[in-house]
Structure formats: C-alpha cells, structure tokens
Image: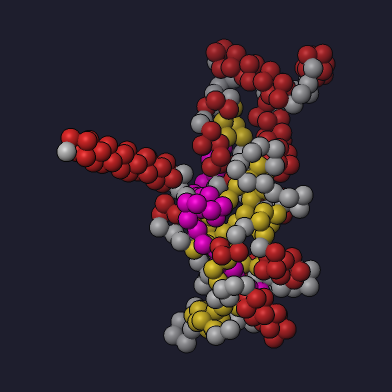
Amino acid sequence: MSQIRTAIQEALQEQRERQHRLALQRTQATKLRLAWSKGITTLYKFLSLNPESREFTLDILRNFRVHFASPESFNDPFDCAPPVELGGALDDPAFRQELTEEMHRFMDAKGLTPREQELLRARGNVTIERLAEEVRAHTLHAVRATTRILCLSTTHQHPLMWSHYAARHTGICLHFQCDAGNVFGLAREVLYPPDRTPILIPISRQTAEELTERLVLTKADFWAYEHEYRVVALTDIDWGHTLNEHNCLKFSPHLLCGITLGMNTGNRDRNEILTLAAQRNPPIPVFQALQSRQRFWMDIVPLDI
C-alpha cells in the first residue's frame, strides 16, 4: 500500500509541476501578447488576385507556404522606423562618457577596425552629437536587411482591409489556425499608440523587449482598425523556423482552416479557388463575403464545395 501511495503522490506532484510550468508559459505568452494567449484561435491574411499577385497568392494554396515581407514593402512610412534620440543632456559629463562608450560599441558593431574608427572621428563623420542620427540610419538598414514579417489580422470582415489588401474586394482572405504549437502561434499583437516613442541612446536605456516593440510592433493609431498581429523572423538568427531563399515558410496544410472570397472576386478566380480548396484532404472550408443589408458592413457565409 505504501508503494501505491508513494506512486500516487509522485503522479500528483508531477501533475502540479506540469500545471505550474504551463501557467508560467501562459504568463510569459501573455506578456508577449501572443495571439493564442488571448484566446485567438484564427488569424487572417488578405491577398490580391490581380495579375501581378495572382500566382503568388495561389502558390500558398498549392504549396502551403507563406511569404514574410521586408519592411521596405510596407505601405506605412512610419512602420519599423522609430525616431532615435539622445537619452540625456550633452552638457552632462557622465552622459557624454556614456555616449563615448556607445559610439565605440556602435563602430565595433559596424565592423570597423580601430584605424578606420580613428579616421572617421578625425573627419567628423561620427561624433557624439551625430550619434543618434548615425544609429538610426544603421538600425533602419539592419532592420530592412535582416527582418521579415508576416502580417495577419484578427478580423476578416472589415471593408477597409478588403479594399487595401485584397484589391478592392476582388481578392481573398485566408484563415490560419493559431495555437501555441504552430508558427502562427508566434504572432504578437501590434500596438497603436497616439504618439511615437523614440529609441534612446545609449541603447541600454531600454530593454530588449522595448526595442522590439518600438522597431517592429508599433504602428500609428489610425491603423488600429486592422487589429494586426505579426510573426517576426530574422534571416541571420535561428528563430525556430527557416525561411527559404524567397523568404517563404512551409506550414502544415491543416493549418489553413478557411478561405473567404471577396464580394467582387471574379468567376475565373472563384472557380480556381474552389478547385484548390476541394483538392485538400479534407477540403478547405470556403466562405463568401456579402454586403450586409442592415449596415455598412459585410456578412460572411459558408459555401458548399
């Protein structure tokens, strides 16, 4: 009996420890604003079927891979481009010393030799006074060179989303299953503050999380209707997944859990989408966006395929 009692106690203790680990994971996920930690189970991607985008969009349905875009392609000039400011007064000797050390770290990060650094300082190309400007230029270049982003939304009904990203309602919207165990579960909520928060120099004036938010997870409040979540990838660091040479990522076919056709999707595109949806086993559910009769909005209804 004592052995059975001990076994039960050990099993219960293991269960409590597992629940504790899960609670810690959920707490961390909540801090990171991961979509699944907020109870979001589906994220949406609007896509065009215009001639220049059609094959790219259909490739997702044929080969089950999504494209991570460079911030250079974004339609918002403020996106991934925060201001950079000095975090103190230049007449403070202690702060100037901090900036001097930061300047050395900055030039080291650029891969400059001591001799090259000395020449730049002698020419006045890199000075304490110009440090914020230099860091901003270097940071924006680095973000555009190495950061790739998958932009998703929690809504597939907002008419402006269809207008902006699905070619005036002629495209489609894909539904992706979101949970802690798949790549879409890495999607993090975008913040929409009324004002821009600068990155402060020295960089140590903010945490790594604050830097991440200001660089890639903050947009102007006039974009708030998008309810955007982002999966952020780095091309030069292992982030748990691998993009191919075209910045595309394969995903399990079952994670594509629905397709919504736009109100103005043409017959040719409609037929091709329905055919591709039916080819998956099981078939991908397809929906139709329709004008609401009661308000300036859209209704989404299921289709038989």
Q: Quadrant of residue 10?
A: top left
For the point 54% across and 84% down, which residue is it?
Answer: 303
Judge whether residue 152 is colored magenta.
Answer: no
Residue 53 location in percent, x, y?
75, 68
Quadrant containing the C terminus is: bottom right
Residue 147 location in percent, x, y?
67, 44
User: Could you tell me if residue 169 is visible in this image?
Assistant: no
Residue 88 location in percent, x, y?
54, 23
Q: Decide which of 79, 110 is in the foreground and name it.
A: 110
Q: Is residue 227 left or right of residue 56?
A: left
Q: How is the image coloured?
A: secondary structure
User: Could you tell me if residue 87 is visible in this image?
Assistant: yes
Q: Decide which of 156, 284 is in the foreground and name it.
A: 284
Q: Quadrant of residue 282?
A: bottom right
Q: Decide which of 113, 30 is in the foreground and name it.
A: 30
What are the residue bounds of the magenta stretch? 169-198
**Depicted 137 relative to depicted 187: above or below:** above
Q: Decide which of 294, 249 is in the foreground and name it.
A: 249
Judge whether residue 185 is colored magenta.
Answer: yes
Residue 268 location in percent, x, y?
73, 84
Quadrant containing the N terminus is: top left
**Depicted 14 relative to depicted 283: above or below:** above
Dominant secondary structure (helix, strand or loop) of the stretch shown in magenta:
loop
